[in-house]
Amino acid sequence: MSAERHNWTKEEILEIYNQPMMDLLFRAANVHREFHDPNTVQVSTLLSIKTGGCPEDCGYCPQAARYHTDVEGNDLMTVSHVKAQALRAKASGSSRVCMGAAWRNVKDGPEFDQVLEMVRTINKLDMEVCCTLGMLTENQAQRLAEAGLYAYNHNLDTSEDYYKDVISTRAFEDRLKTIDNVRKSNVTVCSGGIIGMGEKLEDRAGMLVALATLNPQPESVPINALVAVEGTPMEDMEPVPIWDMIRMVATTRIVMPKTQVRLSAGRTNMSREGQALCFFAGANSIFAGDKLLTTPNPDVNEDMEMFKLLGLKPQQAFVKAPQPKTVEHEESVLQPLGEKPKWTRPGHKIERNEEAKAKARRS
């Protein structure tokens, strides 16, 4: 019986990650079968409801306003447009819609009110609703919960040690504070990271330590392979080897046995055989659709063909946690507080980020 632990060390996780591949796969698969149906995979659709213009300097992100990429910005989507996209996703087999906005943090006002209405609308379609909107306060998390939000995504991205080499406009502590604010509501937590950003194996283990020692552990952990986008500071990074992804998925499954491990960005570079090994190693969630916010993703029909080949079936909504109730706007007991939290701005410089910003100015 594998128990959920909250005292993992970096050394223990590195020992798991580095063991012989066959032993790692065997152990991870056994843990996976203990807590999950190995033939069921959650299918989610990621929808960018507000694209581009982000003030952050994340070295991997094409939505940062300071870099010159081919991303075309757009204003916040309408509720009706989001509903239409959600219905299309449901018809294609998705049980969850994750809405992403390129914001540094949530701000009370008309746009957040519009997002709350999107949450209410999708929850009434009997779909799980997830949002990723940047940092948010406890009151904002409670308002999202009241609207019917099922999950909130806030990735740690990498280890605390390597974080300062990726992002300079916010601090690692801000990520943990937001997760803590979400935990004070009834919303489940989705938090993971990216590999292939130039980090060491110790950083991959460090990220898993940060996630696995949370109590409770995140209900969902996305494992992303960096998609190197031209114009970003990380445009020249080499693709992550599939074996690294398999090892990362398997290790995540072992240290977070009850978590939904999501095979996220980078799947376009993975063969079906590689993805199959990730599912065997414990991945039981994917994003479907031809785009993940701004980067390519396999077509949903390709995924359904792969599911048929492997004998996989999509997971139904609300299997892991009950459906939240939706409180209508006029019946809400929570009010915006007009908060202006002072989220951290570390202020240090990251050389490759500065170079990418200078290059964009010359373009």
Image: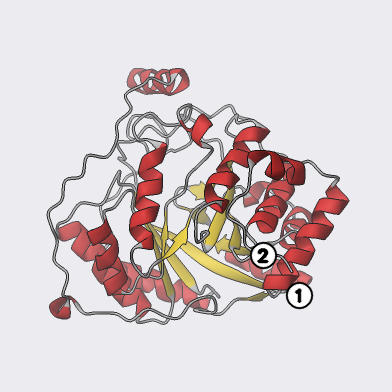
**How far from the left and from the top, in percent, is residue 353?**
43, 24
The answer to whether the residue labelled 2 contacts the one labelled 1, judged by CB atoms less than 8 Å apart, is: no
Q: Gap in Å between the C-alphas at discs 2 and 1?
A: 28 Å
Q: Residues within 10 Å of mark 1 (few under 14, many from 20)?
A: few
Q: Nearer the viewer, residue 272 or 127?
A: 127
Residue 54 appears in which quarter of the rendering? top left
Which residue type carries mark 2? Ala
Left or right of 19, for residue 93: left
The quadrant in which the C terminus is found is top left
Residue 162 sits above or below residue 336 on the image:
above
Residue 223 sits above or below residue 299 on the image:
above
Residue furthest out toward the front: 7
The quadrant in which the N terminus is found is bottom right
Which residue type carries mark 1? Gly
Residue 31 appears in which quarter of the rendering? bottom right
Q: Which of marks 2 and 1 is nearer the N terminus?
A: 2
Q: Which of 42 and 51 is in front in this view?
A: 42
Left or right of 272, for residue 130: left
Q: How crowded is mark 2: few (under 14 residues within 10 Å), some or many (20 or more)?
A: few
**How far from the left and from the top, in percent, is residue 63?**
38, 40
Mark 2 lies on residue: 3
Left or right of 24, for residue 263: left
**How far from the left and from the top, in percent, is residue 164?**
45, 28
Q: Which residue is drawn at 28% across and 47% down?
A: 105
Q: Residue at x 66, y 55 (%)?
A: 255
Q: Which of 73 and 282 is in front in this view?
A: 282
Q: How is the image coloured?
A: secondary structure
Left or right of 192, for residue 64: left
**The disc label shown at residue 311, or none:** 1
